[in-house]
């Protein structure tokens, strides 16, 4: 670079990057991985301060398989399971315990080769730092479906109800902490619920946002 420090090191084969390459900023390593015939083709590691990402590339294309760390602790992980027909996406608390987990169909590319956001499909749940489930239910074709349950921090049932094609049914049941009372509430208008995962920010938004419980109305 302009400061006289190494910016990159690796070897060429037939005029193309091949094998292990390392990249630097101000003399510090920031990225490394292997090329095959000029294309990224392995697990690549990127580092920036206390953050670290490990991403998989095949024939130069990012596969969406990745693991992220902050301060040396795992933060998120996405990878195929079994025969690859389903992918699991998980996030973790800073104590290493699972924060949330959801499943998607395999990632696909459009006609221009651009990687599309995967479609949520399968069981989904979030947990607190103690490992207690805060909510659980099913996602199908990217929408909430079927019976969902939400819990207090201590694990007691807080509320439950059904989703139909991503919309809350009209009647939900709320449970008070002492378990001696419960109330059924009716919302005035069904609300469509969706879930999305930001691959850049690596945070779950929408329904999985912390404390984003169904908005209920007194009937």
Image: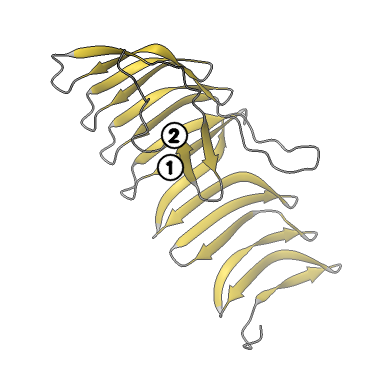
Please state the horizontal and vertical placement of residue 106, each as a whole percent of the image: 64, 32
Which one is nearer the viewer's eye here, 200 or 75? Answer: 200
In the image, 105: left or right of 147? right
* Residue 213: quadrant of the picture: top left
Q: In the rendered image of this protein, does residue 88 appear above or below residue 19?
A: above
Q: Name the residue: 47% across, 40% down.
A: 204
* Residue at far bottom of view: 4
Please state the horizontal and vertical placement of residue 80, each as a whole percent of the image: 58, 36
Which one is nearer the viewer's eye here, 196 or 45? Answer: 196
In the image, 211: left or right of 69? left
* Residue 179: quadrant of the picture: top left
Tag 1 secondary structure: strand
Give the mark, 1 or 2, whose residue is nearer the N terminus.
Answer: 1
Q: Name the residue: 46% across, 17% down.
A: 190
In the image, 18: left or right of 107? right
Checking the image for residue 115, the label placed there is none
Q: Are marks 1 and 2 in contact (CB under 8 Å)?
A: yes
Q: Name the residue: 75% across, 50% down.
A: 59
In the image, 18: left or right of 77? right
Please state the horizontal and vertical placement of residue 123, each as a whole percent of the image: 46, 24
Q: Alpha-carbon distance for marks 1 and 2? A: 7 Å
Tag 2 secondary structure: strand
Q: Residues within 10 Å of mark 2 (few under 14, many from 20)?
A: many
Q: Which residue is mark 2?
A: 101
Q: Which residue is mark 1?
A: 91
Please state the horizontal and vertical placement of residue 217, each as a whole percent of the image: 33, 19
């Amino acid at each position: 670079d302009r400061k006289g420090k190494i910016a990159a090191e690796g070897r060429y084969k037939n005029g193309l990057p091949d094998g292990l390459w390392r990249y630097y900023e101000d003399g510090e390593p920031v990225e490394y991985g292997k090329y095959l015939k000029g294309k990224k083709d392995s697990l690549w590691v990127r580092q920036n301060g206390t953050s670290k990402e490990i991403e998989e590339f095949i024939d130069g294309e990012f596969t969406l398989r990745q693991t992220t760390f902050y301060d040396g602790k795992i933060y998120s992980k996405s990878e195929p399971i079994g025969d690859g027909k389903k992918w699991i996406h998980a996030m973790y608390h800073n104590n290493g315990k699972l924060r949330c987990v959801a499943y998607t169909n395999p990632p696909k590319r459009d006609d221009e080769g651009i990687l599309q956001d995967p479609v949520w499909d399968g069981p989904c749940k979030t947990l607190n730092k103690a490992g207690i489930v805060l909510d659980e239910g099913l996602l199908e074709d990217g929408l909430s479906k079927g019976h969902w349950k939400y819990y207090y921090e201590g694990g007691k049932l807080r509320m439950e109800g059904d989703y139909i094609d991503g919309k809350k049914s009209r009647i939900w049941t709320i449970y008070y902490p002492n378990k001696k009372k419960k109330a059924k509430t009716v919302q005035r208008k069904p609300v469509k619920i969706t879930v999305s995962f930001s691959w850049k920010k690596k945070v779950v938004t929408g329904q999985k946002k912390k404390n984003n419980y169904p908005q209920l109305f007194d009937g």
